[in-house]
């Protein structure tokens, strides 16, 4: 029997997370839980602190204060590599592919990073058995994101939308439990945006994931997410199911009203 998202245990617990940059408080005393298996949206106006919060959650930026734990393990203070090792993987608002490598090589490099081999083995091949396994897995992931027929093409030649899909394949290569997507719909055309909801749900179900996403495209967030959190000037001003968040006067004033 499927357990309702609301009754599932927390997989992430953010407590009083704050990040200052000089005099600017980019993330201000933010606390929330993310439950196992949910699709959790993070929205807010430009500069509200969404990416900074993702950076705090993935070890890219240390918090000024506060903690993040995942099933009892402290995440804050770990390097991005160690955070990935805990099963927390992400994509970036500014796409970070190896533009001069093929789609297949991009996914293989990400897979190798999870195994003992490093970047160069990722490109030129490691132990043969491991290499075959990595290659098979990379093809599977490219297939999942619909890019296997273009495996040999350079990442630089892909449209924005396809580069985002490739980034998701790379993030999945590390076999995460928690996937953070920073603006997955940015640069996608209307048809691609339409398919993204079903795609993210399919990925969540297939890999038994919890998904957090930052997204400016409000209809996508509202149609996709189990719960939505709203940041404004670094503060968490609302959290709940999409319908109640959309009705919240604070949210309308801060964000949706300004759309
Ligand atoms: N490394 C940094 N140094 C100084 N200020 C920063 C740094 N990173 C972010 N900021 C500031 O922190 C605030 C929050 O930025 P952040 O990028 O997290 O917002 P955001 O909600 O992701 O915005 P957007 O929707 O435009 O991507 C902004 O005022 C930004 O200028």
Image (cartoon, rainbow, N blue to C red):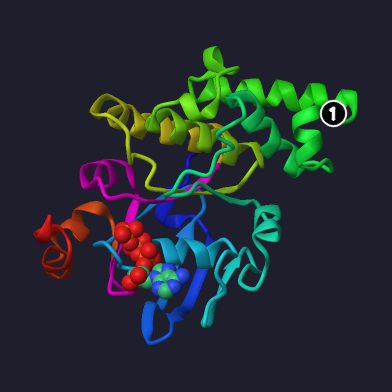
Dividing the picture into quadrants, the one containing residue 247 is: bottom left
SS for dot 1: helix
Residue pushed farthest top? 149
Horizontal and vertical percent position of residue 6: 40, 55
Residue in view at x 74 percent, y 43 percent:
114
Q: Nearer the viewer, residue 94 or 11?
A: 94
The quadrant of the rendered image in which ligand 1 is seen is: bottom left
Horizontal and vertical percent position of residue 214: 37, 53
Horizontal and vertical percent position of residue 208: 56, 40
Residue in view at x 47 percent, y 49 percent:
92
Q: Is residue 236 magenta?
A: yes
Q: Nearer the viewer, residue 166 or 28?
A: 166
Q: How many marks?
A: 1
Residue pushed farthest bottom? 23
Is residue 33 visible to the viewer in this orientation of the structure?
Answer: no
Is residue 196 visible to the viewer in this orientation of the structure?
Answer: yes
Residue pushed farthest front? 100
Q: Is the residue marked by circle 1 packed among few (<14), some (14-19), or many (20+) residues within 10 Å? A: some
Q: Is residue 181 magenta?
A: no
Position of the C terminus by quadrant? bottom left
Label 1 C-beta lies within 8 Å of the nearest ligand 1 atom: no
Residue in view at x 61 percent, y 72 percent:
76
Horizontal and vertical percent position of residue 223: 26, 41
Instruction: Give the residues drawn in magenta, as a range.
Output: 209-238
Q: Nearer the viewer, residue 120 or 150?
A: 120
Dividing the picture into quadrants, the one containing residue 105 is: top right
Dividing the picture into quadrants, the one containing residue 133 is: top right
Q: Is residue 11 above or below residue 154?
A: below
Residue in view at x 28 percent, y 55 percent:
241
Q: Is residue 17 above or below residue 213?
A: below
Residue pointed to by mark 1: 130
Compared across the picture, whether 14 is left or right of 98 comes to left
């Amino acid at each position: 029997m499927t357990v309702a998202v609301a009754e599932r245990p927390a997989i992430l617990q953010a407590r009083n997370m704050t990040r200052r940059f000089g005099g600017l408080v980019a993330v201000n005393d933010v606390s929330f839980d993310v439950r196992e298996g949910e699709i959790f949206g993070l929205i807010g106006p430009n500069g509200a602190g969404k990416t900074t919060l993702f950076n705090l959650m993935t070890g890219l930026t240390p918090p000024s204060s506060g903690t993040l734990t995942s099933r009892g393990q402290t995440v804050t203070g770990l390097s991005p590599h160690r955070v990935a090792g805990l099963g927390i993987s992400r994509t970036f608002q500014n796409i970070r592919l190896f533009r001069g490598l093929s789609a297949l090589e991009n996914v293989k490099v990400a897979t190798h990073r999870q195994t003992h081999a490093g970047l160069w083995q990722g490109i030129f091949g490691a132990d043969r058995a491991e290499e075959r396994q990595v290659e098979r897995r990379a093809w599977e992931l490219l297939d999942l994101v619909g890019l296997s027929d273009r495996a040999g093409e350079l990442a630089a030649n892909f449209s924005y939308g396809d580069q985002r899909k490739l980034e998701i394949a790379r993030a999945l290569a590390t076999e995460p439990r928690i996937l953070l997507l920073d603006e997955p719909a940015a640069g996608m055309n209307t048809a691609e945006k339409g398919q993204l909801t079903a795609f993210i749900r399919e990925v969540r179900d297939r890999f038994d994931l919890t998904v957090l996403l930052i997204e400016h495209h409000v209809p996508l967030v509202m149609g996709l997410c189990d719960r939505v959190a709203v940041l404004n000037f670094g503060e968490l001003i609302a959290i709940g199911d999409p319908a109640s968040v959309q009705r919240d006067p604070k949210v309308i004033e801060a964000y949706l009203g300004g759309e």
